[in-house]
Amino acid sequence: MLRVKPRARVVLHDAKAADTHGWHKRGAEDALEHNKKRLEQLQYTLYAEGVESLLVVLQAMDTAGKDSTIRNVMTAFNPQGCTVHAFKVPNDAERQYDYLWRAHLRVPPRGSIAVFNRSYYEDVLVVRVEKLVGATIWKRRYRHINEFERLLTDCNTRIVKICLHISKDEQKERLEARLEDPAKHWKWDAADLEKRKQWRDYMQAYEAMLARCSTAHAPWYVVPSDRKWFRNFAVSQILVHELESLSPQLPASSVDPEHYRIF
Ligand code: ADP
């Protein structure tokens, strides 16, 4: 339902950000807990099998809740088999390579899960809106990205891309809450206000990304995120669905318990 069909035209209306698809808070919270247990089992089997891996890409406007989704949902995973990487403005070393290099370094090995908190999609989002490179350069990146994701998929990495969609009004409330709470001041970044001024340009860049890069092999999901409880539940549901469709299996046992005695 939240999955973007290949080449579908997506319009990120503010109204859609508050959609809860008929769910109520209590039911969604219970379902989240149930899904987290299932995710734990699925990761265990994925790890034991050691054949496929899962890459979860999170993108969103500021305050939509990338960090808190990781804290509330991805904590279902055993840290032994899961990494999280937050992509920032490329540093000097990273700038010496192509823009996909730093992401490729961090893709999950077999049996593991990697979560990208922001990703190479920044190279068609902030880079496009802030005009950090010319249009001819960012326009060809959609193709690079689709091909990069095809390569990863062909090599046993399942890619799940999740765009947390909040409305401009909800962002205002969350920014105000940050200002009012000294414990949240460390998160305050005046640059977020500049991005907010370019809201429409960012929405256009997101819409282009969704239309161009939601493919059969690496789909985008748009998760309404004005309600935090719905966001967490929906992300957990997507992850359960994607991991179940990988259908990981425990390796066949070659151990005969009768053969051993433990003293
Ligand atoms: P976050 O907002 O994700 O919690 P930060 O406040 O450290 O974390 O922001 C990271 C910043 O890095 C964001 O503004 C993001 O747009 C920027 N960024 C990430 N990747 C790139 C990139 N490839 N080029 C330019 N800026 C980038």
Image (tube, grey):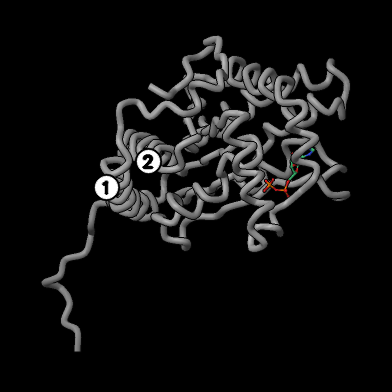
Q: What residue is shown at x 34% (from left), y 55% (from top)?
A: 44
Mark closer to the chain start, 1 or 2: 1
Q: Is residue 59 above or below residue 207?
A: below
Left or right? Give the position of 185 relative to 167: right
**Quarter of the image where the N terminus is located:** top left
Q: What residue is shown at x 19% (from left), y 89% (from top)?
A: 263
Say which quarter of the image contains residue 198: top right
Left or right? Give the position of 16 relative to 248: right
Q: What residue is shown at x 87% (from left), y 29% (from top)?
A: 132
- Nearer-the-camera pick, 235 or 165: 165
Secondary element at tag 2: helix
Q: Any mark on residue 72, and which?
A: none
The answer to whether residue 143 of the structure is visible from this angle is no
| Residue tagged 2 | 233
| Residue tagged 1 | 30
Say which quarter of the image contains residue 199: top right
Q: Could you tell me the amino acid type at mark 2?
A: Phe
